[in-house]
Image (cartoon, helix red, strand yellow):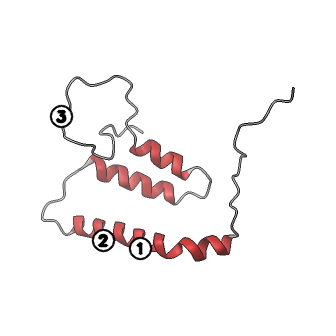
């Protein structure tokens, strides 16, 4: 019985050409970048600038975006994910913060 390879190829392929992908998705992602830039500009205009783990995580993610290799999505997801294994007894916030407070990633 032949073993089926269930692993993804090292470099996933896209069913569209590079041009088709850019034509279809560029404007959507251009708008997202402008939205992030506006958010960072808004923070810079605040009266006082405070250190915030969520903004630190966002900066780390932006650096990952500048890398030229496959796997950026996984790296960013790891930056924004809570990797703790033990459950907490009491939640100190209502809802998720979107980034872990640990900055040692």
Q: What SS does tag 3 mark?
A: loop
Q: Residues within 10 Å of mark 2 (few under 14, many from 20)?
A: few
Q: Give the position of the N terminus as an image quadrant.
A: top right
Q: At x 66% / y 75%, what residue is drawn?
A: 19
Q: Which residue corresponds to mark 3?
A: 92
Residue 13 location, quadrant: bottom right
Which of the two labelled residues, at mark 1 and mark 2, occupies the earlier sequence position?
1
Which of the two labelled residues, at mark 1 and mark 3, occupies the earlier sequence position?
1
Q: What SS does tag 1 mark?
A: helix
Residue 40 location, quadrant: bottom left
Q: CA distance from mark 1 to mark 3?
A: 34 Å
Q: Residues within 10 Å of mark 3 (few under 14, many from 20)?
A: few
Q: Nearer the viewer, mark 3 or mark 2?
A: 3
Q: In the image, residue 75 lies at what x, y percent? A: 50, 46
Q: What SS does tag 2 mark?
A: helix
Q: In the image, residue 25 lies at what x, y percent? A: 54, 71
Q: Which residue corresponds to mark 2?
A: 38
Q: Which residue corresponds to mark 1?
A: 31
Q: Give the position of the C terminus as an image quadrant.
A: top left
Q: At x 22% / y 23%, what residue is drawn?
A: 89
Q: Which mark is residue 85?
A: none
Does 89 sit above or below residue 23?
above
Q: In the image, residue 26 lies at what x, y percent? A: 53, 74
Q: Is 6 placed left or right of 52 in the picture?
A: right
Does 93 sit above or below residue 49?
above
Which of the two labelled residues, at mark 3 and mark 2, occupies the earlier sequence position?
2
Q: Is 14 placed left or right of 62 in the picture?
A: right
Q: Nearer the viewer, residue 13 or 104?
A: 13
Q: At x 70% / y 62%, what residue is drawn?
A: 15
Q: CA distance from mark 3 to mark 2?
A: 30 Å
Q: Give the farthest residue toward the left.
A: 47
């Amino acid at each position: 019985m032949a073993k089926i390879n269930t692993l993804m190829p090292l470099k996933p392929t896209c069913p569209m050409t590079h041009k088709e992908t850019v034509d279809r998705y560029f404007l959507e992602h251009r708008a997202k970048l402008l939205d992030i830039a506006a958010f960072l500009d808004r923070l810079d205009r605040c009266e006082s600038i405070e250190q915030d783990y969520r903004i630190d995580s966002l900066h780390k993610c932006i650096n990952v975006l500048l890398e030229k290799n496959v796997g950026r999505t996984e790296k960013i997801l790891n930056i924004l994910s809570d990797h703790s294994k033990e459950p907490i007894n009491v939640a100190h916030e209502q809802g998720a913060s979107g980034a872990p407070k640990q900055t040692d990633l």
